[in-house]
Image (cartoon, grey):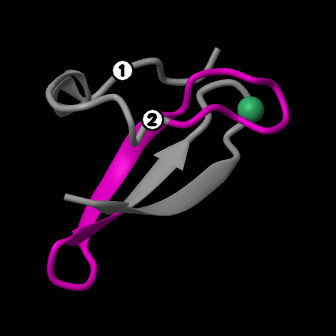
Amino acid sequence: MLNRSVPSFFHGKATSGRSFCADCDAPMILSLLEQDKPGFDLRTFVCPMCAATESIVVRV
Ligand SMILES: [Zn+2]
């Protein structure tokens, strides 16, 4: 098993930005949260099962 520690801030806000791994359907963990354009966040998720990553832009 890989490191299963989940950032606590993941449990905070809306779950609308949450995504699931395209390969194994596991709930992905938010690993990086950056500022994108004003009013938008760039969120990078990582899959705890296969380590795939996905970046999405979320309106805040
Ligand atoms: Zn996966």
Residue position marked by numbered label 1 in the rendering: 5
In the drawing, does residue 41 fall left or right of residue 23? left
Give the magenta-colored segment's residue range.
19-42
Report if the beta carbon of the residue with label 2 is closer than 8 angstroms to ligand 1: no
| 52 relative to 6, above or below | below
Mark found first going from the N terminus, 1 or 2: 1
Where is residue 54? Give x, y as percent.
Answer: 60, 55
Residue 30 falls in which quadrant of the image? top left
What residue lies at 46% left-to-right and 18% top-to-bottom?
Answer: 4
Q: For mark 1, does the 10 Å Cα neighbourhood hold few (<14), some (14 to 19), or many (20 or more) residues? A: few
Q: Is residue 33 magenta?
A: yes
Q: Is residue 28 magenta?
A: yes
Q: Secondary structure at mark 2?
A: loop
Q: For mark 2, does the 10 Å Cα neighbourhood hold few (<14), some (14 to 19), or many (20 or more) residues? A: some
Going by the numbered disc 2, the residue's amino acid type is: Arg
What residue lies at 17% left-to-right and 31% top-to-bottom?
Answer: 13
Residue position marked by numbered label 2 in the rendering: 18
Q: What is the CA distance from the residue labelled 1 to the residue labelled 2?
A: 17 Å
What residue lies at 38% left-to-right and 36% top-to-bottom?
Answer: 16
Where is residue 37? Give x, y as percent.
Answer: 25, 85
Where is residue 43? Give x, y as percent.
Answer: 38, 57
Going by the numbered disc 1, the residue's amino acid type is: Ser
Q: What quarter of the picture does the N terminus occupy?
A: top right
